[in-house]
Amino acid sequence: MGGLREALDAHVRRLAGTPLSALIAADPERAQAFALRCGPLYVNFARQRYDRAALDALFAIAERADLAGALRRLLEGDIVNPTEARPALHSALRGAVAQSAFALAARAQAVSVQLRMRELVQALAASPVTDIVSIGIGGSDLGPRLVVDALAQPQARFRVHFLSNVDGHAAQRVLAGLDPARTAAVMISKTFTTQETLLNGGIVRDWLGDAERMYAVTAYPQRAEAFGIAPERVLPMWDWVGGRYSLWSAVGFPIALALGMERFEALLEGAAALDAHALQAPLRENLPVWHALTAVWNRNGLQAATQAVLPYDERLRLLPAYLQQLVMESLGKSVRIDGASVAVNTAPVWWGGAGTDTQHSFFQALHQGTQVVPADFIGVRQAAHGFEANHAALLANLLAQTEALANGQDSEDPHRRYPGNRPSTLLLLDALTPQALGMLIAFYEHSVYLQAVLWQINAFDQFGVELGKQLASRLLPALQGQGQADDPVTQALLEVLRTGE
Ligand SMILES: O=P(O)(O)OC[C@H]1O[C@](O)(CO)[C@@H](O)[C@@H]1O
């Protein structure tokens, strides 16, 4: 967007000498005025380093970039992925929020696959199978892994295990302790060409003895059938679903197995409610819009190179890994849609981990390090356990950290001084239900898309991951003793790997 940096710079300069604590003191209504709610999701931006005038400038940028129109185009199925000439209709997997013919047709396809998923879940539930191995990587793994880890109950009908890494130790660990007679496997791969998934699928097929209890989810059913998986056990997906936006499709089959179909549908409902909010709420009351503008303020105004995500809930410990792919595969671009180089920095490095563990590892750097790291803190008001003292302690720590980062504390001893002025957003869920988790994930999806719109980049391609894959397949024969590497350093390293010298 033309002039993005200029529009922010005037406010960054104006606010340079005003710490966050002073911004808050000067605006007594701020804690309420900078907060929004959508159903079970409450988000408070009061501890970001902007004031109302800077926010006005940010919302003017949102108007100029037509973020409302961009959301409508996304949800209606316009070609928002022009480098691959595709829409990105993940919203159609969870509801019929947009009424365009394309979105409604996509919705009909999604509903018919959900019916097939339900039947397959029921058939498996009536079988002796107790364990499921879900084989996939990236977008075909991280979403289901997050949701299952967050919401699966110990008494669930199936135990679901995830196998992603091509490192054979991963397969060794996952299969150890499982009984092939009581295990089924699901290969999830949009392309069904992904090296890791094909190799791991082969290991599991051999371990099971045949492909009789193997299922597949893919946009290329014929490839799964060539692998030996019968058509009645292959669930389709479509090129209008991006891998990292796909947990709502049949990619969520492991979720439906772990949680039951009803709770999978509740996850979809929560996401659909956020879709409706994104589409209908005015910009100033629109959660993903506000979050995306904050991200741009921190990246292009404050020049923050990284962004932390800190769930204060053990069940959300995999959220940082999930968001790393969502954000950095979507926004890690330096070329705009029109082919020109971007004029401003795009995605910061996203990283994080679950509190309170992380307080005892990297929080020192957040409080006193030289880099300002904006953070999203995520809490859940009601716990699903009876250990009340623990939950109170967890929430007290969550509040304490956001306050300490914002306000700091002075000291005559420079070693004991906390500079403060470190921005954070607080996200609170009423309870970690499937609906609330669906809403939280959809909130981040839309924020990421809107950041891409503001930066004029494509959120839905990922050509950057291809070169390494191509080189790896060229080097594989050389590693196995056939041929040589073209690059002299790689050739020398191949020798070290082959001979140890
Ligand atoms: O589902 P597939 O085709 O196996 O791809 C897996 C992942 O690989 C990538 O293409 C690159 O890491 C991701 O975008 C995708 O989620």
Image (cartoon, rainbow, N blue to C red):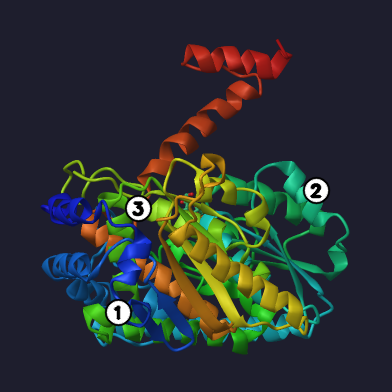
Separation of marks 1 and 3 at Cα, in angstroms = 21 Å
Residue at figure coordinates x 44%, y 54% from the top left: 420
The residue type indicated by label 2 comes to Gln
Q: Are there few (<14), some (14-19), or many (20+) residues within 10 Å of tag 1?
A: some
Residue at figure coordinates x 38%, y 78% from the top left: 31
Q: Which mark is residue 75?
A: none
Separation of marks 1 and 2 at Cα, in angstroms = 46 Å
Q: Are there few (<14), some (14-19), or many (20+) residues within 10 Å of tag 2?
A: few
Q: Are there few (<14), some (14-19), or many (20+) residues within 10 Å of tag 3?
A: many
- Tell me the residue that label 2 is attached to: 172
- Residue 297 image position (x, y, % from top left): 28, 58
- Tell me the residue that label 1 is attached to: 286
Residue at figure coordinates x 66%, y 14% from the top left: 496
Q: Could you tell which of marks 1 and 2 lies nearer the N-terminus? A: 2
Q: Mark 3: which secondary structure? A: helix
Q: Of circles 1 and 2, which is in front?
A: 1
Residue 58 falls left or right of residue 108 = left
Separation of marks 3 and 2 at Cα, in angstroms = 34 Å
- Tell me the residue that label 3 is attached to: 331
Q: Could you tell which of marks 3 and 2 lies nearer the N-terminus? A: 2
